[in-house]
Every structure is written in structure tokens, then in C-alpha cells.
Image (cartoon, rainbow, N blue to C red):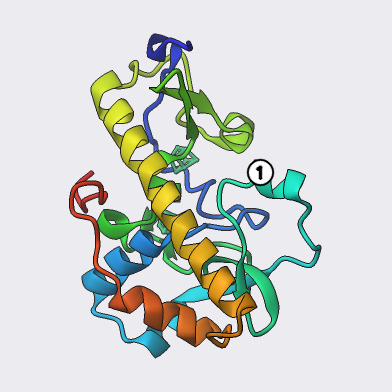
């Protein structure tokens, strides 16, 4: 097990994670619901906020096993859902002047957890720095304080649970599409998510 004591991090709002043109800001169904509730968005407005990043390959079962979030069937093929980016490749919610996130309290889990990732080992939540975090996060430094174990462990549990629930939604959607019970449209996906309730026990609250 990796000791959480070895992690020193403090977000210094450098914005590097928000402006990385090569990273998709993944959104789970609960992220989408949180943003919907926070901004009172309609389905069409949500379609303007999100992008469906088409996954060109046919994923092998080996690749699927490695994916933290699986692609979902859309009218244009399998896709990952993420926040839209502007022309420079930054997240549309990044405010350059203020160097801040415009939806900070309702931002996706992906943003909340950066520069860390979580995994379970013997049912214990473990943490590690992501490759991108080590590459450019200005908040990782021996000069900063050690992370709050309780906070990050609790967040890790919720995020891992959220990913499981999200995967269930994606698998169910893809199965229904394969059975030709539903048409795989981006609008249909958002509409289905809007109809879903949030599991209050595990949802990441705005202030976390
Ligand atoms: S939602 Fe906010 S924190 Fe997340 S990438 Fe966009 S600007 Fe950054
Ligand atoms: S890269 Fe690190 S320090 Fe910079 S905004 Fe993202 S989390 Fe904060």
C-alpha cells in the first residue's frame, strides 16, 4: 500500500490542467447532473457544453478492461463524453483573465481529483500521481503541505463508486443500442441522464 504521507500538493491555480489540449475533461453521468442542476441547463444547452469525442478504433476486450471510463454508443460511433474545448484546446469554462474555473463548485470529478488517480488495493483506497500531473501540475512540490488523508480517501471512495455507477449506465445504454431498443443519439444520452436520479449517498457535493 502507498502511504498517503508521501504526497504533497496544493492547487496553485496554474491552469495547466484546464488548458491541456491533449486531455479530455471526462464527464460522468453524475458530473452532467451536477452541472445541469448548478446551471439550470436544458438538454440542448448541455449539448453545447459537452463534446462527444469519437473513439475511432474498435476497442479490444483487453483495451476495454484498461479503460477507466468506457466509450458510449452515439449516432457517430463510440465516443467519450467530455467538456467542450475552445479553439486553443482549453476547457470552455476556464477563465483566462481570472485564471479560474467558471464552474468551480460544480466542476467534474476529473478536475476535483487532478493531479491524482485512485485505485483499490485489498479494499483500501489508494492514491497516485497521474502521469500528466507529474508532467505539468505546479501544485506538486516538496514545498507544499501534505495532503489531508481523510479528505482524499473519502473523495477517492466516492469517485471510484461514481465510476462504477457511470459504467453501469454506459453498459446498459450500449446493450440497449445493440438490441436496437434505442437509437444511439447524443441527445438521447443526455435526455436519459437528465431523467436519472442521483444516488445521494455517494454523489460528490458541490463543496467537496
Ligand atoms: S471544468 Fe473548470 S476545473 Fe475543470 S477543466 Fe474546466 S475550467 Fe478546469
Ligand atoms: S495543474 Fe495542478 S496546480 Fe495547476 S490548476 Fe491544475 S491542479 Fe491546480
Secondary structure category for the residue under label 1 = helix
Residue 91 seen by the camera: no
Percent of width and height locating residue 64: 68, 50
Q: Is residue 171 visible?
A: yes
Using a 10 Å C-alpha cutoff, classify the residue at mark 1 as few (fewer than 14 neighbours), some (14 to 19) or many (20 or more): few
Residue 190 is left or right of residue 102, and the answer is right
Where residue 93 sits: x, y (%)? 42, 66
75 vs 71: above or below = below
User: Residue at left 48%, top 48%?
Assistant: 15
Q: Where is residue 150 in the image (x, y as percent from the top left)?
A: 24, 23
Label 1 beta carbon less than 8 Å to ligand 1: no
Q: What is the x, y in percent for residue 161?
A: 37, 43
Name the side, left or right, on which 160 lies relative to 42: right
In-front residue for pair 205/63: 63
Q: Name the residue under label 1.
A: 65
Q: Residue furthest front?
A: 179
In front of the other: 100 or 166:
166
Vertically, is 78 above or below 67?
Answer: below
Relative depth, front residue between 94 and 174: 174
Instruction: Name which quarter of the figure residue 73 lies in.
Output: bottom right
Amino acid at each position: 500500500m502507498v502511504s498517503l504521507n508521501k504526497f504533497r500538493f496544493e492547487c496553485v491555480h496554474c491552469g495547466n490542467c484546464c488548458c491541456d489540449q491533449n486531455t479530455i475533461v471526462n464527464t460522468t453521468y453524475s458530473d452532467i447532473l451536477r452541472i445541469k442542476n448548478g446551471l439550470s441547463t436544458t438538454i440542448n444547452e448541455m449539448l453545447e457544453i459537452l463534446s462527444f469525442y469519437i473513439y475511432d478504433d474498435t476497442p479490444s476486450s483487453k483495451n476495454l478492461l484498461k479503460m477507466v471510463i468506457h466509450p458510449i454508443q452515439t449516432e457517430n460511433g463510440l465516443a467519450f463524453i467530455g467538456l467542450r474545448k475552445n479553439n486553443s484546446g482549453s476547457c470552455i469554462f476556464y477563465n483566462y483573465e481570472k485564471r479560474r474555473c467558471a464552474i468551480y463548485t460544480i466542476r467534474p470529478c476529473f478536475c476535483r481529483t487532478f493531479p491524482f488517480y485512485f485505485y483499490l488495493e485489498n479494499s483500501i483506497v489508494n492514491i497516485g500521481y497521474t502521469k500528466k500531473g507529474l508532467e505539468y501540475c505546479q501544485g506538486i512540490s516538496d514545498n507544499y503541505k501534505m495532503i489531508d488523508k481523510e479528505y482524499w480517501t473519502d473523495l477517492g471512495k466516492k469517485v471510484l463508486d461514481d465510476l462504477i455507477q457511470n459504467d453501469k449506465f454506459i453498459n446498459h445504454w450500449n446493450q440497449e443500442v445493440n438490441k436496437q431498443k434505442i437509437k444511439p443519439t447524443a441527445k438521447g444520452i443526455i435526455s436519459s441522464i437528465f431523467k436519472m436520479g442521483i444516488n445521494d449517498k455517494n454523489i460528490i457535493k458541490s463543496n467537496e
